[in-house]
Image (cartoon, rainbow, N blue to C red):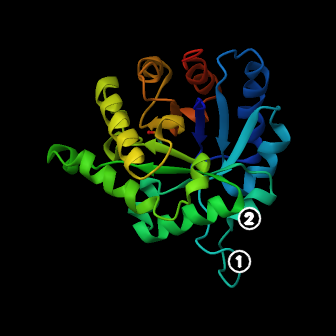
């Protein structure tokens, strides 16, 4: 059965003081959550230890990026093995900000997915079309291409280490959200493409990301192929983030 997950991507925000402030409600309210959601906090890498220290059992931690190499003379980089060694279980790969602002290519993203899996991390592969691509009617084609390219290194027995986050670029940090119906349609197309790639598609968790808030989360998470969310801005507001976690339906 696929896992229900709400992951909070703090991006390049936060401080040690903010970790304490944000993690306290997560800790106190998590015990009351009875919908089985897996909560993943993805802070800047420097704060992973602080988050782990404040986290209650059941909260998992991830990093926002890893190197495409496993070790060596790559000043400034952090390997998947280091993230795992530091207590992380997850890594974001191919976030649109990395693709656009850091020119990450499909080949680099595939290498990072491979590093994540070899290190024992679950890779959250982010895919999504731009507004121009959606308007041109090529959204599904673009997303399918990102999936094929990003997952090219996944071995037959490594699929349990893959989560896919569909994040339309035009919805990230903009306040615009895909309608629940459009998001569902893309998630179904993603599951279909995963099947073609040989993945156990029905067992993989697919998350929606892009301006998810407390007031639109329930409609999105009620969709058949949406197993939770990847949350940016709203994950920096503890009460709002916990409301989003509560919006995951109790069981399939
Ligand atoms: C994200 O950064 O992955 C994201 C979805 O951001 P936001 O929720 O702010 O749109």
* Closer to the camera in the image, 231 or 161: 161
The reply to whether residue 212 is visible in this rendering is yes
Task: Tell me residue 78's x, y (percent).
Answer: 68, 68
Q: Counting residues from the N terminus, which is met first, the one under dot 2 or under dot 1?
A: 1
Question: Is 232 displayed left or right of 129 in the figure?
Answer: right
Residue at 69% across, 15% down:
34
User: Residue 85 sits in which quadrant?
Assistant: bottom right
- Reading the image, the residue beneath label 2 is 81
The reply to whether the C-beta atoms of the residues labelled 2 and 1 are less than 8 Å apart is yes
Crowd band around label 2 with a 10 angstrom C-alpha radius: few (<14), some (14–19), many (20+): many
* Closer to the camera in the image, 131 or 85: 85
Q: Quadrant of the C terminus?
A: top right
Task: Tell me residue 183's x, y (percent).
Answer: 34, 31
- Residue 218 is labelled as none
Residue extending furthest toward the bottom: 73
Question: Is 134 displayed left or right of 176 in the figure?
Answer: left
Task: Tell me residue 86's x, y (percent).
Answer: 80, 56
Q: Quadrant of the N terminus?
A: top right
- Reading the image, the residue beneath label 1 is 71
């Amino acid at each position: 059965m696929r896992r229900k997950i709400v992951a909070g991507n703090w991006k390049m925000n936060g401080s040690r003081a903010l970790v304490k402030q944000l993690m306290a409600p997560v800790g106190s309210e998590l015990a009351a959550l009875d919908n089985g959601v897996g909560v993943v906090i993805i802070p800047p890498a420097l704060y992973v230890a602080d988050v782990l220290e404040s986290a209650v059992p059941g909260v998992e931690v991830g990093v926002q990026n890893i190197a495409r190499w496993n070790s060596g003379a790559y000043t400034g980089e952090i390997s998947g093995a280091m993230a795992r060694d530091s207590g992380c279980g997850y890594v974001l790969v191919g976030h649109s900000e990395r693709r656009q602002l850091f020119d990450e290519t499909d080949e680099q993203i595939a290498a990072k997915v491979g590093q994540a899996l070899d290190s024992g991390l679950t890779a959250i592969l982010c895919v999504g079309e731009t507004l121009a691509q959606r308007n041109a009617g090529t959204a599904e084609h673009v997303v399918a291409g990102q999936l094929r390219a990003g997952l090219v290194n996944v071995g037959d027995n490594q699929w349990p280490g893959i989560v896919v986050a569909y994040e339309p670029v035009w919805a990230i940090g903009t306040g615009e959200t895909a309608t629940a119906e459009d998001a569902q349609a893309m998630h179904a197309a993603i599951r279909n493409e995963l099947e073609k790639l040989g993945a156990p598609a029905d067992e993989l968790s697919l998350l929606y990301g892009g301006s998810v808030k407390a007031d639109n989360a329930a409609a999105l998470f009620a969709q058949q192929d949406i197993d939770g969310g990847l949350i940016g801005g709203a994950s920096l507001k503890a009460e709002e983030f916990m409301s989003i976690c509560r919006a995951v339906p109790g069981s399939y």
